[in-house]
Image (cartoon, helix red, strand yellow):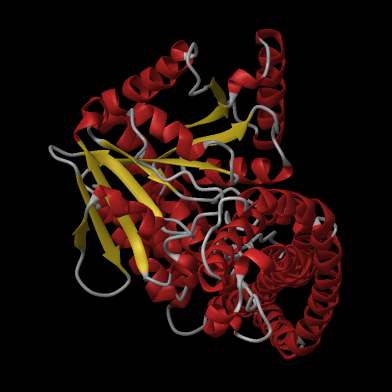
Amino acid sequence: MDLSGTVARVGAICGRLGIGSLEPQLAACGEMLKGGGVVDVAVLGQFKAGKSSFLNGLIGGAIVPVDVLPSTAVVTRIGYGQRERVTVHGLAGEPFEIPMARLAEFVTERGNPANEKRVAVVDVELSALAPYDGIRFVDTPGLGSIFAHNTRVSRDWMPRVGAALVAVSVNHPLSEDDLLLLNDVSLHTPEAAILLTKADLVSGEELASVIEFTRSQATSRTGKEWRILPVSNRPGFEGMREEVAKYLRERIAGRREEAFGEIVRHKVHALVAGCREYLNLAERAAGAADAARSDLVAALERERRGFGSVKGEIRLLCNHLQAEVRTAADERFHAYHGEVTGRVTADLREAMAGWKGHLGRVTREFEGWLADAMMEEMGAVSLYGEGHLAGFLFRAQASVERSVRAFADRLAKEIERALGIRFEGAQFDPQVEEPAHPDVRLSPTFDTYFELLWFLIPMPVFRPLVRRHFVRRVPWEVEKNLSRVAGQWADAVGASIDGLFRDATAFLEREVGTIAGLVGEADAGNRGEEIRAALAELAALESAVS
């Protein structure tokens, strides 16, 4: 049996029996099988872990934008092509080509804020990647960061990963978020390694210790042995880069067909196992006594009627955390006021020495300079937001997961009580959104628009006064824009928490609906016989692809 046929038959079983929870895995397997054998090698990791710098070093040129601001969730795929070409695939409309120089306009948050250009994916083809023909590097900006690794785009795409390099900076070894990402990767591919970036920051002895620590932590959390590949783009570390290139050439590109087969079989096995668990539940229900099945159906209906109180509990929790986030964001970002004001004021005094001309010209110089300075300063300050507010998101995620798990545990107990079997069901994968970069806006330099009257103001006399006015504007502009950054981070984290609420309630309703459908219809006609036939078919399919 070919793998495409296997996926199609599992999909048919899920369709007939109403198992909707496996749709993402079905779509991912189908898409990969249609990809012509190309293996997508995802470079994952937290923001600023060195993913883009690594890709540029591998390619041998500054192709992937490296921005001081977080990138969008636009996926960029980079592979071999006979000529340099960049193709933008939109969420609607026909694909179109752009010059390489315009890539940043479509894949970075600065050039494409909040993905306002509605880009689905960007494909980059480079002749320099001929040694890696047959594999395609996938840059998923921020996928492993606190705010992005569970975005809808990234989470929906994750099942499509072929192989993976999980980037971890040597000066920030394995965080809890990294370990969660490693677990996710393990579910979707058997071919993955840890890329230990910025290896030049530590001595050889320290690097050996970091490698050992990373390996032991990763193995202990995932139960899998991980290959650790240290790397640096600095001169003198060419040997490390060649080791990574050799791994990619020999382990994946050089055995592309074999690696592709292993990866697809891994995904199909996971798909079959998930389908089998639901069918086992349905089979047990079909063979159970009418009273036991009726009791379970009644229990499921009670849980469904109780959704209101569960939703209320989760909503109350989320509202409380959102209020805490807003207060904390305001306090933590405004702590930078003195530092930023001092730095901008000093730079302004130096810049003003070169401004000549009438009041209108000097005012325009000041406003342009201040806009650039605020964008740079707020962009830099914004990078601290993840560290400042991550704890609230972790608390929200953990609390919502506990509520979902408690609900799922009640379902599992009802199933075990009625049918005598343990049932895990689908796993709840919370999804959070990545914040956009600061929207820096400035107030008019003068309360009255004196630029219209510039010819009446003798600058040799009033220049010191004008300069003092410019300097006095700085603290207010810093205060205003820090408030904006704090508000945007609070809004972004608040939206993430709202997303957790929506995903949790949708998950619970979908899971109860699926289970109720499997159990409630188990006694209809030849339902039991249909389920046993489906299980037999799954067993045959699993044996055929082993």
> Would you say 482 lies left or right of 167 here?
right
Q: Residue at x 50, y 48 (%)?
A: 67
Q: Which quarter of the rendered picture does the C terminus lie within?
A: top left
Residue 173 vs residue 190, the one in the foreground: 173
**In terms of depth relative to the viewer, which is nearer, 441 or 236?**
441
Considering every residue shown, the one lying at the far left of the view is: 82
Q: Position of residue 200 (x, y in %)?
A: 60, 19
Instruction: Identify which residue is drawn at 60% across, 74% down.
Output: 511
Q: For this rendering, which residue is in front, 39 or 205?
A: 205
> Is 310 on the left-hand or right-hand side of 232?
right
Q: Position of residue 282 (x, y in %)?
A: 55, 70
In the rendered image of this protein, does residue 370 appear above or below residue 165? below
Q: Quadrant of residue 510?
A: bottom right
Residue 424 in view here: yes
Q: Residue at x 67, y 57 (%)?
A: 382
- Where 376 sits versus 500, above or below? above
525, above or below 197, in the image: below
